[in-house]
Structures are given as C-alpha cells and as structure tokens.
Image (tube, grey):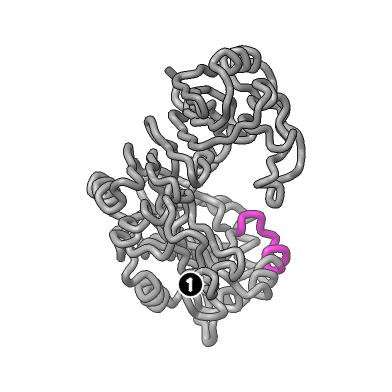
C-alpha cells in the first residue's frame, strides 16, 4: 500500500512499502522522534525529521514508544537546544558577526552505531546526526541572533563538541586591500623578528624581539587593530622592495589580514586617514577596499613588471652608460640567487630582462638611470654584478666597479593601460 499525506502547502510525503519496512524495523529500537525521522531524512523535501517520524507512525498505526532513557543514537542531543543556544551565546559574547557556520563533533562510536542501524533497517535515505544537528542548531542561532547561517564566507565558525559539552569558536579574519607608498629608507615591509632570539626578546634587540623598530605592516595595521580589537595582523604584499628602497608612484598592492577581530564594521575612509596621519612621512595608503582570502593568493601569484630609479656611484662616461643600456635593453640576463638572500632562497640561475633603460642625470662620480624590468629582477645585483653572479651586469658592460647609492620603485605595473 502507498499513501500520500499532506504536511504543508506544496509538500507531500509518500509512505511507500519500502519506507514502512524501515519504520517497522526501527520502531522499538529506542529512538527519539528526530532520530527515527532521520532514518528517512533524505526522503521528501520541506519536512523536519520529527514530521517524518509522525507520518511514518501514523502510517504504521503505532506511536513511537515513550523513552525512559536517552535516545540510543543521539543521547538526547536533539532535546537540549536551549542548553546549546546558551553555550553559543557564551562563546560568541563580545564578537561581532553577521554570518556564521555551524559544525559539530560527535563520539565516533555513536556515528558507527548510526551506520549499523541504517544497515539493519535497510534504509538508503538516512541523514547523519552530524548533518541534522548542524542544520537545526544553525536555524536556532539564526533566529536568536539575526545573523545568517552559511557554508561559505562566515565571520564565525561554531563547533559544538557534544562529548565535551562545549562550543568552540573560530573567528575568521577580515581582509582589506589597498596600495601603500613608502618614503622611509629604514623600514621593512613586514615585522622582522630578531635573528638572535627569534622574537622572544634579548639584550641584542633591547627586549623588543625585533630587528627593526617598526615596519609597513605595523604602521598600517595599528589603526586597524585599535578599531577592530583584533589580536594581530598578517601583511601580504605584491612583492616587496628592499628595506632601504622607497616605494613611490601609485604604490604597491597589498592585503592586510586582521586576525580575530572583535568588531568587523569598520570605516575604511577613516582608517585610511588614520594610517596616513600617524605614519606621515614614512608610509601612506590609498584605495582601501574590503577583500577576502582569495585576494591574498592573487596578490602573491602576481608578477607584474616594475619601474625603478637607481642612483649609481662610479666613475664612467655618459657615452659608456648609454652604450651599455642599449646593449642590455630587452635582452635576457642570467641572475644567480644573490649572495645577500642565498641563505633563505634556492641557489639557482634565473633568466630575467631589463625591458627598457635610460640615463636621466650624471655627474663625475655618479649617475641616475630609470628602467623597467621583469618581475623578480634583482636591480642592485644587475648594477654591481654581485661578484659575477649576474651576467651581464651594468658594471661589467661599462668596465668599472659600480655600487647602488639609492633605489626607488617608481611603479608596479599591475594594471592594464
């Protein structure tokens, strides 16, 4: 026999002989209404599992036995929603959030018992306790907080640990994209831990744990930490300039990641102004917009050409410099990993190109050139040769020793046009 029972407008649940056989085998197993309905939780749409249980028992003509002890599958988890909502409220107190994801951790033995019962009853429509609990807790958290339950882009991840009886909280970072300019020739891009104590603090670093007193990351991040109540930052730049090089032009693209922010509704124009005021003369930011973790990957993988201004010390003639620049422009150069970074990068030879270069100023003992080069070109080593590790170098082509006195990044060519 097959019956069709209306539950809500546009929703029907056809109790087939197969479903009745599953229900008969499970009726006296000590299941709560939620777990009894979950045996066919993937059958039919628009129903709760207790509603499925009710329809099955009506079709059987027998009610579910009254339980005298907790459900053998869930242990009573589906009867303690107020307790779990209280735990969620305690875990999320003080954290601003608009989107969340619910998860749960179960005793493996309970989950194994559940699968055994599916086999014994012959159901092929069972819904796992974890899936049902996550969904039902999410519905209740939505109603209690007004936040949106989601599977992607959550501000918080709530993990209900059923064996431990607690809710674990994962606070997702916030991301802000922009561009920075740097005038200070003593400033690294990111926080630089002391090489001797590795950030713990020692006599060498005067207890700071840092090689340099500040960084672009810290100057940009400080107003964001104050506004968000965050617990730290990560700074992701589209490459990085040398510490003693300035970053000019339109600035270098970056993403600032603020870790564990208590407040997420931030005023970006005000924060942009705060960074530029507090870091005046050292760092400036522009074009701040909200971003996401995917942007970090795009920033890190980008390899745009760059333009530079280089002040070079060395006694040579304009004629030799111009001749050397004409020889090298557009042709490949071989650069072995520079001596100054060989301790942290693979020692190999990379082919790079100086795309264009011109002499813009000169005096008897120094000259200034502007050039455009492929991403990853070591400009200082291209000038001085790095003991022969760059071939050909500008010093090699003009025939005299050269050193870089000052270097500026004029532009990151990451935008078309």
Asked whether the viewer can see residue 4, the reply is no
Q: Residue furthest front?
A: 364
Please state which of residues 6 and 164 is positioned toward the viewer in this rendering: 164
Q: Is residue 143 above or below residue 220?
A: below
Please state which of residues 229 and 84 is positioned toward the viewer in this rendering: 229
Does residue 303 belong to the magenta stretch? Answer: no
Q: Pointer 1: what residue?
A: 206
Identified at 56% across, 18% down, the residue is 317
Identified at 47% across, 30% down, the residue is 412
Identified at 36% across, 76% down, the residue is 90
Left or right of 308: which side holds 388? right
Looking at the picture, how far across and down is residue 315, in whole percent? 57, 26
Give the magenta-colored segment's residue range. Answer: 116-126
Looking at the picture, how far across and down is residue 36, in whole percent? 55, 67
Asked whether the viewer can see residue 390, the reply is yes
Q: Residue furthest bottom?
A: 68
Please state which of residues 176 and 357 is positioned toward the viewer in this rendering: 357
Please state which of residues 38 and 178 is positioned toward the viewer in this rendering: 178
Q: Is residue 160 above or below residue 171?
A: below
Left or right of 336: which side holds 75? left
Identified at 43% across, 77% down, the residue is 80
Looking at the picture, how far across and down is residue 23, in whole percent? 60, 64
Q: Quadrant of the C terminus?
A: top left
Looking at the picture, how far across and down is residue 236, in whole percent? 49, 46
């Amino acid at each position: 026999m097959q019956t069709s029972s209306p539950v809500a407008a546009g929703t029907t649940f056809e109790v087939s002989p197969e479903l009745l056989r599953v229900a008969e085998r499970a009726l006296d197993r000590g299941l709560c209404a939620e777990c009894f309905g979950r045996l066919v939780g993937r059958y039919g749409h628009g129903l709760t599992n207790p509603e499925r249980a009710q329809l099955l028992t009506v079709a059987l003509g027998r009610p579910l036995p009254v339980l005298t002890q907790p459900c053998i599958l869930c242990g009573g988890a589906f009867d303690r929603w107020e307790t779990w909502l209280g735990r969620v409220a305690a875990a999320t107190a003080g954290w601003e959030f608009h989107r969340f994801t619910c998860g749960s951790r179960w005793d493996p033995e309970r989950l194994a018992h559940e699968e055994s019962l599916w086999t014994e009853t012959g159901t092929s429509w069972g819904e796992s306790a974890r899936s049902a609990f996550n969904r039902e807790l999410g519905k209740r958290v939505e109603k209690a907080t007004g936040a949106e339950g989601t599977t992607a882009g959550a501000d918080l991840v709530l993990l209900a640990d059923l064996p431990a009886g607690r809710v674990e909280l994962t606070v997702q970072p916030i991301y802000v994209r922009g561009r920075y300019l740097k005038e200070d020739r003593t400033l690294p891009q990111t926080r630089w831990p002391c090489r001797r104590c590795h950030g713990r603090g020692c006599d060498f670093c005067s207890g700071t744990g840092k090689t340099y007193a500040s960084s672009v990351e810290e100057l940009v991040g400080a107003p964001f930490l104050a506004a968000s109540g965050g617990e730290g930052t990560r700074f992701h730049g589209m490459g990085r300039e040398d510490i003693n090089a300035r970053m000019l032009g339109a600035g270098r693209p970056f993403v600032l990641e603020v870790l564990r922010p208590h407040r997420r509704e931030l005023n970006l124009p005000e924060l942009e102004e705060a960074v530029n005021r507090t870091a005046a003369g050292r760092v400036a930011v522009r074009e701040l917009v909200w971003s996401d973790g995917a942007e970090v990957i795009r920033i890190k993988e980008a390899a745009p050409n760059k333009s530079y201004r280089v002040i070079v010390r060395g006694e040579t003639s304009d004629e030799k410099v111009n001749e050397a620049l004409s020889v090298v422009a557009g042709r490949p150069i071989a650069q072995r990993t520079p001596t100054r970074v060989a301790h942290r990068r693979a020692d190999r030879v990379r082919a790079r190109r100086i795309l264009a270069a011109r002499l813009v100023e000169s005096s008897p003992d120094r000259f200034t050139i502007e050039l455009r080069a492929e991403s990853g070109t070591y400009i200082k080593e291209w000038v001085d040769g790095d003991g022969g590790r760059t071939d050909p170098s500008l010093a090699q082509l003009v025939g005299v020793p050269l050193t870089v006195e000052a270097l500026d990044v004029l532009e990151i060519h990451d935008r078309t046009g």
